[in-house]
Amino acid sequence: MHPLRQTVDRQQTVVLVHGLASLPFVMAPLAKSLGGHYENVVNWTYPSLWSRIEWHAATLVGLLKRLDGETSDEENSDGEVHLITHSMGGIIARLALAQYLPRRIGRFVMIAPPNRGSPVARRLAPWLGGLCPPLHQLTDHEASFVCTLPPPSLCELGIIAAQGDFMVLEHSTRLGCERDHIVLPGLHSSVLWQRETAEQVRHFIEHGKFRRTTNRL
């Protein structure tokens, strides 16, 4: 037997949600790493550019209901469902969880989420917002869609910010209600491909907090 397969958890489900203008291959390295520890890893995708966040959230709700055993498409299970998101995927998941909180919900890790908006979205929205509606929703204006969303009620929330991220600044990733927050090396997307990111995601799933080392502190 492959040594990784000795530690696979057959009960836990991990759902990955990519961000704006992205595809599942961006999350593939993280999915592969988590797949060595959790048998059911779902790298979910959606047409991110052309529809508002509410539409994507409603589609994600459908997946969560299937995983929760509310429909006949999926077998019911006693294991938890964990959400791992990148960028706008975290906002979609926040809205989805506000509409439907699965019975099996576990922990939620947001990577580089624009919880307080993005300055890049603000600059691009006047030019490209007509073609890409989420840009208007993700601006860092105080009255924007993302900035007026209520905080999630889920207590098992961890947030990872990227140290060199100019698209979503570190302070914009914070909500104030998260259980833990950590800043890791990398840019907005490249942070997804770091080994440490995968290890920290798994550590939060297992322990409800990120791993701290003496040299980081």
Image (spheres, rainbow, N blue to C red):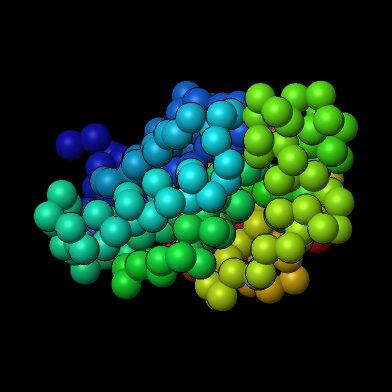
Q: Evaluate whether residue 192 shows in this view.
A: no
* Residue 158 visible, this angle: yes
- In this rendering, the count of numbered labels is 0
Please tell me which residue lies in front, 40 or 184: 40
**Picture quarter containing residue 147?**
bottom right
The residue depicted at 73 percent of the width and 45 percent of the height is 138
Give the quadrant of the N terminus: top left
Q: Is residue 20 above or below residue 216?
A: above
Query: Between 212 and 30, which is closer to the camera in this rendering?
Result: 30
34 left or right of 94 in image? left
Q: Is residue 69 above or below residue 14?
A: below
Nearest the eye: 172 or 207: 172
Quarter of the figure with the C terminus:
bottom right
Residue 204 lies, with reference to residue 24, above or below; the image says below
Percent position (x, y) of residue 122? 84, 38
Residue that appears at 78% across and 53% down: 144
Residue 111 in the image: above or below residue 126: below
**Could you tell me residue 157's position as x and y percent?**
58, 66
Q: Position of residue 153 (x, y in %)?
A: 56, 75
What residue sits 28% from the left and 39% below the top? 3
| Quadrant in which residue 130 is drawn | top right
> Residue at (25%, 54%) from the top-left corner?
66
Query: Residue furthest toward the front?
Result: 130
**Would residue 97 be found to the left or right of residue 217 on screen?**
left
- Residue 173 x, y percent position in the rendering: 75, 54
Q: Between residues 30 and 116, which one lies in front from this camera angle? A: 116
